[in-house]
Image (spheres, rainbow, N blue to C red):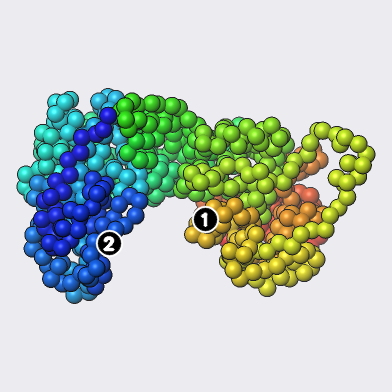
Amino acid sequence: MHNAITDDLEALLEALPPSIHEAVDRLDNRGELLEIVMDLGRLPEARFPDGEVILSDQPITYADLEYVVERIGEFGDDNRAGIERTLHRISALRNRKGRVVGLTCRIGRAVLGSIALIRDIVEQGQSILILGRPGVGKTTLLREIARVLADEANKRVVVVDTSNEIAGDGDIPHPGIGRARRMQVAHTSMQHAVMIEAVENHMPQVIVIDEIGTELEAQAARTIAERGVQLIATAHGNSLSNLLVNPTLSDLVGGIQTVTLGDEEARRRHTQKSILERKAPPTFDVVVEQQSWQELIVHRDVAETVDNLLRGQPVIAEVRTRDEESGRVSVRRVTIGGMELPAWGGSGSLAGRQGGSLPFERSAGGWSNLRQIGQVTWRDAATADSLRRNGQSSLQALAPTGLATHLRRAPSGLVTLSNTAPALASDEEPANELEAQEAAAPSPPRPIRIYPFGVNRDRLEQAARQLGVPVIITKNENEANAIITLKNYYRRQPERLQQAADDQKTIIILKNNTVAQMQHALARIFALPEEEEEGNSDSLVGPVPDEETRRALLEAEDAIHRLLNNGLTAAELAPANAYVRRLQHQLASRYNLFSRSRGKEPNRRVKIFRS
């Protein structure tokens, strides 16, 4: 069963120069045509989902561009125009003088039946936010929802059409929206005002909006939802996780705020006192991530999903697929990993990509032993089963220096446990004494090529030289086996680090750009014994603390609380012995604060800084 498609392609072809019109007519797969691109001095091309086709061997001239401009509607302030009563969109490229030097002619189609995947949700009256990459079909789905609600559900539907992309150019809307009414927007910056006007003046039951992109539009959407009007909209973002870390649009799903917990509550949750929580009820009840024409991921309860993401817990979603031949819709529930929580115990750095790093929480033994929360993503269940069979179900955190060796990014963009992770201790005994001797025999370390990203190269060479480890520092990241970078760079996830993760390279994360930090990381890689230093131990496990130690740790917690909430820049603690100072350094590091030991024994003490 195929969807009924209306594209009015001939109306667009008649506006093109005859030579290009004839070239398109000769194409066999016109039904899959996405865009026709005309750039001054270049050959015209037709774009399809699987590539491009050159339409002529003659470069585009000013006359060709003017031929098209004269036959279409006027350009708005967003440099978009259309053809009356069609869904086609023509976007202009201009030079500094404002003259058109390029055109992108995008074919608009009304696809009847594309609502089948989420028809049940739409008819329940819930507000729906549709996310997805450009060109995946969000606007087409939005148009079909407007038609079904207006014609088949007999609801009062108003479409706020900023670029005339939903209902086409001209004063008469395209039949693709059915009996829904359309409000045009004179200037793109006024979309939020037209949204409010639609509610106040026209008494709609449903409002349909394309591309919510500003904070004012997000606020207008919340106002509409609070008045009991069903809201159907699209927004910029590939997934709910992307949207959540977008400061402009995160309010659509409730927003994020930092909350300071009391001592008892923090201990009960086994977390730091400053955590991230949802700020308000979500504007939208349901979020739909459109993967393709035939596949969607549906989050039925946005409030619960956002709460789980912020806690680093896995979320339950629905994957809906539709068979292209039979039209049958299948729904299956899947578990998707939570958002990234940094292993160094910070106050919550969100990656902004679905499934950034697998979430971890503190175990009873302290921060050195972490356990994975929930399940691995549904696409990687086989890998998880294999790892569980091999006994590799837990990882060791590296704080303050971190290694991303244990994680790799799957082709789907989700992060899974890697088989290249260091082997954990096994309860199995060797088959014989010879095997035990061979396993215990040390082998010479193999050289590692490291590419420093944002890290001082001379200090890295000095650290490797002092440790005597075989490190080759390369200037070409493609030749490197590992990338070493700073925590601040890793949080921003620049393109080079993303590419390194895609190539399954080891990523070494340093807290500071110091020789000591680099030696600490290299010692971890080459399994060298390290001396305990203040603030660098991974575990808070030690002797049972006496009353004096407890008081010192409470003093450190109070100081951290004042730094985080009272605007102080530094706090100095009372003198303490080396063991207590080490615990205080670790406590500061857990909250992403800096700390230094000052003075001489017996008056040596810890000072904690914001920066």
Residue type at numbered disc 1 = Gln
Q: Quickly name the residue at label 2.
A: 54
> Where is residue 235 shown, x and y percent of the image?
31, 45
Q: Secondary structure at mark 2?
A: strand
Q: Along the line of sight, which residue is nearer the eye, 283 or 535?
A: 283
Q: Is residue 255 visible?
A: no
Question: In the rendered image, which quarter is residue 482 located in?
Answer: bottom right
Which quadrant would the N terminus be assigned to in this image? Answer: top left
Q: Along the line of sight, which residue is nearer the eye, 14 or 25?
A: 25
Q: Residue at x 28, y 42 (%)?
A: 138
For the residues labelled 1 and 2, the Cα–Cα distance comes to 33 Å
Q: Quickly name the residue at label 1.
A: 498
Which quadrant would the C terminus be assigned to in this image? Answer: bottom right
Disc on the earlier residue, 1 or 2: 2
In the drawing, what numbered circle is on residue 343? Answer: none
Q: Is residue 119 visible?
A: yes
Question: In the rendered image, which quarter is residue 473 located in?
Answer: bottom right
Give the side of residue 608 with respect to residue 230, left or right: right
Q: Compared to 456, does 579 lie above or below? A: above
Question: In the rendered image, which quarter is residue 234 located in?
Answer: top left
